[in-house]
Image: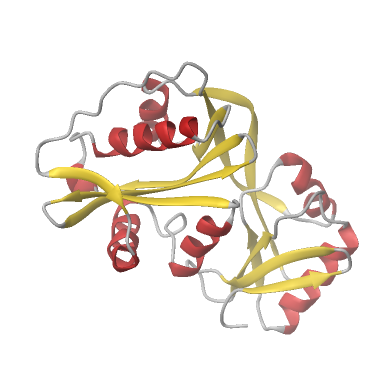
Amino acid sequence: MTSRQLLTVGQDRFRVGPWHAGDGVAYLALAPQRSEPSTDSVRGCLRRIADAGYSSVITSALHPDEARSFLAIGFEERDRLRVLSHDLRDLDPPHPQLDGSTVVRRGRRGDRDAALGVDGRAFSDFWRLDRAAMVDAERATPTTRFRVADSDGRIAGYAITGRGGAQGFLQRLATDPEMAGRGVGSALVIDALRWAARRRCRRLLVNTQEENARALELYRRLGFTPTATDLVVLHRPVP
């Protein structure tokens, strides 16, 4: 299992593959489905992961309802993400303050490698995306939009925004640390808010690490408020 694969176990589906931040570690995510997976399905998925030679497994960010089956069979919390929401009714976001050399535009296929480079500089090894994880982010919702901040031909940041029903999701936001304080992150978030509002989403959700004070301050300054629900990343050894 050298790349991410879709596994069907019982009535549930999972995406499984290597975890970029550790040898012998498998990444396990839920494929889109209507309910939490059964404990039997999670156990069956673990057996498949063990057969592939992995020694441990880490999950994607899970809603508490989705996490119950994992916790019931010995998974433990590795990290916790704060979820914030922006009401899109009567949206009136501020105008981004960008210098004349930086524009937000549609991302092209050729921009993805540069965007992954930005991601690697913006996040620690644990949280950075590889190509497979970026594909997962773009496939997480029925409608997806990939946007970049272009500064004189150099990718200074990017955002992946999605829509599912009447809800929008800012799936990923990364800005180059060298561009900190120049309004790149704000411009990409405002762009995402306006796009979701035009598509009649009622709110836009985003999540970030509890310790990422800079990102939390950015979202709060732009009108996001914390929700009552956190997401959890779980891990456990493979039996």
Residue at 22% of width from left, 33% of height from top? 183
The quarter of the rendered structure image containing the N terminus is: bottom right
Q: Is residue 215 left or right of residue 40?
A: left
Q: Is residue 232 above or below residue 74?
A: above
How many marks on residues? Answer: 0
Q: Is residue 239 visible?
A: no
Percent position (x, y) of residue 127? 46, 54
Residue at 10% of width from left, 44% of height from top? 101
Q: Is residue 88 above or below residue 204?
A: above
Q: Is residue 177 left or right of residue 166?
A: left
Quarter location, residue 173: top left
Percent position (x, y) of residue 110? 29, 68
Residue at 80% of width from left, 49% of height from top? 34
Percent position (x, y) of residue 21? 47, 66
User: What is the image's colouring?
Assistant: secondary structure
Instruction: Judge by depth and name the residue closer to the eye, 160 or 130.
Output: 160
Q: Is residue 229 left or right of residue 215?
A: right
Instruction: Judge by depth and name the residue closer to the eye, 108 or 135.
Output: 108
Residue at 73% of width from left, 40% of height from top? 64
